[in-house]
Image (spheres, rainbow, N blue to C red):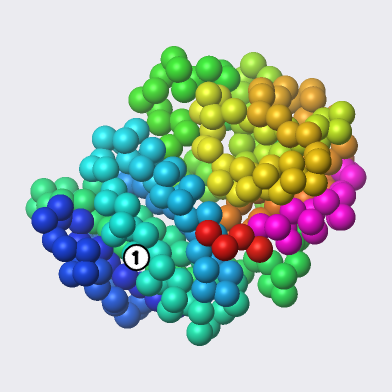
Amino acid sequence: MHVLTLHRLDLAPDVAIDDALTTLDPREALLTATDLAATRGDGIFETVVVVDGVPQALEAHLDRFARSAEMLELPAPRRELWGRAVHTAADALRAHAARGAVKFVMSRGDEAAGEAPTGWALGFAPDNRRGGATPEIDVVLLDRGYRHDVAQTSPWLLQGAKTLSYAVNMAALREARRRGASDVVFTTIDGYVLEGPNSTVIARLDGVYTTVPTELGVLPGTTQGDAFAALEAEGARVEVRAITVEELLRADALWLCSSTRGAAPVRSLDGAPRSVDAAVTERINRALDGRRA
C-alpha cells in the first residue's frame, strides 16, 4: 500500500465543516501514544475504492460507518464532514492513480487526555488489481469458534461491526498462507458460512447467486450489494440466506467481494480446485468500476 494523502478531522460538534479538515504530510505523526486506536484497537473504519477520482458506493459506506459507530457507542458521525474528507482525499488521488482507495477512521480518542474521538482519512494506491486484472484466489475454511446466532446471543462481541480490532483477521490470513492459500472464509461451529477477514462471500448455488445475511453477524457487504444489483440487471437470480458449509462445497462458482479488490473468483477451496467463471467475474467488475456514486 502506497499512502499518498492524509487528512485529519476535527470531530468536535461545534466546529464548522469548512474548518474541520486539515491536510497533513502522510509521513507526519497523527496519533498520540495513548490514542485508543493504537492501544486498544477501539474504533471503526471504512475503505472506499476510488476510480478516476470518484469514490464508489460512498453512501453505503457512510451508512455502514454510522452503523458501526452505533454498535460501539461512538458519537454519530457527521455525514457531511466524513463525506467531505473522502472527496478531498479522492481528489488528491486523481493526479497519482487511476485506481486508489480512501480509508477513513474514527478512534474513541486519547485515553490519557480524555479528548473527543480522533478522526482521519488517508488516500492510498492498493497493491492488488494492478493493471485492472482481478486475481484468482486460493481460500481455506477456518472455524471462527462461534455458533451462527452469536450476534443475537452475545451482541457485546460486536459481530457485524467494522472495527479496528483486526488481530484475529490478520492471524487467520497468516494461517491461510501457512496452508498455501491467500484468503479465508470463516465458518461457524454449527456448520454455517460467514465471511472473509475483509470480504463478503458470494456462492452460485443451483444457478442462484447467494450471500449470507447480516443476522449471522457479518458485515453488510457494500461491494456485494452492488454486485447483486449488476447481476439482477442482467436477469440473474440473487438471494440472501444462510449458507451451510456443505452447500458452499458444492457451489459451482465462488467469489470474495471487497472494496479494493472487487469480486475476486475463488480457484481453490481447502486445496480442492474450483471452477472459475471468468465471464461473470469480468462483467461484475466492469459494473463495479463503472459506478459513479
Whether residue 49 can be seen here: no
User: Residue 90's x, y, as percent?
Assistant: 45, 71
Q: Secondary structure at mark 1?
A: helix
Answer whether residue 285 is magenta in the image.
yes
User: Residue 133's x, y, as percent?
Assistant: 75, 67
Q: Nearer the viewer, residue 163 or 9?
A: 9
Q: Is residue 173 left or right of residue 91?
A: right
Relative height, residue 247 to residue 274 (above, below): above
Relative height, residue 233 to residue 160 (above, below): below
Query: Which residue is drawn at the image coordinates 69% and 42% (left, top)?
Result: 228
Look at the image and give the residue range highlighted in magenta.
273-289
Relative height, residue 226 to residue 123 (above, below): above
Quadrant of the rendered image containing residue 26: bottom left
Q: Is residue 233 left or right of residue 197?
A: right
Q: Is residue 18 left or right of residue 100?
A: left
Query: Which residue is drawn at the image coordinates 63% and 48% (left, top)?
Result: 226
User: Residue 64's x, y, as percent?
Assistant: 44, 43
Examine the residues drawn in magenta and state their main secondary structure: helix
Whether residue 14 can be seen here: yes
Residue to which mark 1 is pinned? 85
